[in-house]
Image (cartoon, grey):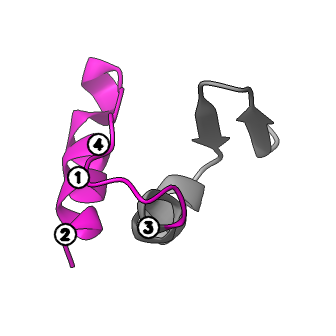
Amino acid sequence: MESFLYESLANRVVFGEGKALNTVKEEVEQLEGKKALVISTRERESSANEIAKHKNR
């Protein structure tokens, strides 16, 4: 599946293999946020946990 970016007035979704891990911290900072909601399937739970940890680096 190709990477894509979906943005609406209330939401911003970054999608793509490896994309979220590499950009999550910058995305949260750009939005002046403190937390990110990471959603994953069970099969990708370890990746989601890695993304959540990466945000705090």
| Marks 2 and 3, how far apart at CA | 11 Å
What residue did someone put label 4 on?
48
* Residue appearing at x 26%, y 48% in the figure: 35
Instruction: Work out whether mark 1 precedes mark 3 in sequence or the reverse, and give the earlier one.
Output: 3
**Contact? badges 4 and 2 (CB < 8 Å):** no
Tell me the magenta residue range.
Answer: 30-57
Mark 3: few, some, or many residues within 10 Å (few <14, many ≥20)?
A: few
- Amino acid type at mark 3: Glu
Figure quadrant of the N terminus: top right
Figure quadrant of the C terminus: bottom left
**Contact? badges 2 and 1 (CB < 8 Å):** yes
* Foreground label between 3 and 4: 3
* Foreground label between 2 and 3: 3
| Marks 3 and 4, how far apart at CA | 19 Å
What residue did someone put label 2 on?
56
Determine if the magenta segment contains residue 4. Answer: no
Instruction: Work out whether mark 3 precedes mark 4 in sequence or the reverse, and give the earlier one.
Output: 3
- Amino acid type at mark 1: Ala
41 relative to 13, above or below: above
Image x and y of residue 55, in percent: 28, 64
**Contact? badges 1 and 4 (CB < 8 Å):** yes
| Marks 1 and 4, how far apart at CA | 6 Å
* Residue appearing at x 23%, y 57% in the figure: 50
What residue did someone put label 1 on?
52
- Amino acid type at mark 2: Asn
Image x and y of residue 9, in percent: 71, 26
* Foreground label between 1 and 3: 3
**Contact? badges 2 and 3 (CB < 8 Å):** no
* Residue appearing at x 25%, y 21% in the figure: 42
Which labelled disc corresponds to residue 29?
3
In the displayed image of the protein, which residue is found farthest to the bottom? 57
* Foreground label between 4 and 2: 2
